[in-house]
Image: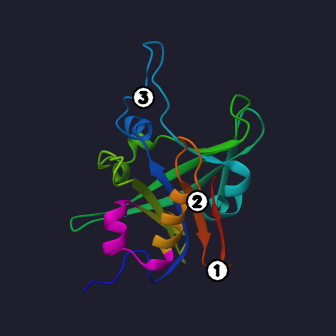
Amino acid sequence: MTEAKGCGKAVAVMFKQIKPGDYRKLAAESNDAPTGGGARDFRFPSAPFAPVLEMFFPKIVGTSANGGNIRRGSLVWSNALLNERYEVDLHPPTDARPTEARISRINSLKPLQDCPEPDDLNPLFVIFTLDKDETFRCDFANTNELNEHWHTDIVRPILESLDVIHGNKSAMGWVNFNTGMEYLHQ
């Protein structure tokens, strides 16, 4: 039996359900009108996600037009052939979306380009894990894969997030293993 994913040196995990709109963002096909390119970001409720977002994106690299800090983190992507690092930016809420922080340019990040198509019967998640060395990784896993290959400390909150979400929202949340705190978005 192989070691469960996410166990070991992870200090935090953040997850978001991938819905068809997110899949279209990752494929750079989210423009519904010919007037623009469409959104290319993952959005998170800024206030409840702030404690963990600041862990994943520790460096302040600039200021946005409305005065909020632009933060940066180092995303590591490894497979049998390569080990690459990507600088990823987190943007603060905008005047148009005053409650949402966003990870930008998701369609241009190689680790996110192999997203499987979401399936309503077997929800798909992007899972960000943060290691003790302040680098983070991302993986995609559906609920079947979570149950088969992931550590129970990560699987439990992800599956619980599906039970607490209301309406057509994406299930999402985070766990800080250092403090034992967690948040499931409703």
Point 50% across, 72% down: residue: 156
Circle 3 crowding by C-alpha within 10 Å: few under 14, some 14–19, many from 20: some
Real-space Cα separation, disc 3 to disc 1, in angstroms = 37 Å
- From which residue to which does the magenta span run? 139-153
Residue farthest along the left direction in this orientation: 81
Point 73% across, 36% down: residue: 98
Point 63% across, 55% down: residue: 185
The answer to the question of whether label 2 and label 1 lie on touching residues, with beta carbons closer than 8 A, is: no
Circle 1 crowding by C-alpha within 10 Å: few under 14, some 14–19, many from 20: few
Colouring: rainbow
Q: Position of residue 182 (x, y in %)?
A: 64, 69
For mark 1, what is the residue? Answer: 178
Q: Nearer the viewer, mark 2 or mark 3?
A: 2
Task: Indicate the secondary structure of the residue bearing disc 2.
Answer: strand
45 up-or-down from 154: above or below = above
Residue 38 within the segment the image draws in magenta: no
Task: Indicate the secondary structure of the residue bearing disc 3.
Answer: loop
What is the quadrant of residue 141 in the picture? bottom left
Q: Position of residue 120 (x, y in %)?
A: 36, 47
Mark identifier at residue 30: 3
The answer to the question of whether label 2 and label 3 lie on touching residues, with beta carbons closer than 8 A, is: no
Q: Amino acid at mark 2?
A: Gly
Residue 151 within the segment the image draws in magenta: yes
Q: Position of residue 125 (x, y in %)?
A: 42, 56
For mark 2, what is the residue? Answer: 173
Circle 2 crowding by C-alpha within 10 Å: few under 14, some 14–19, many from 20: many
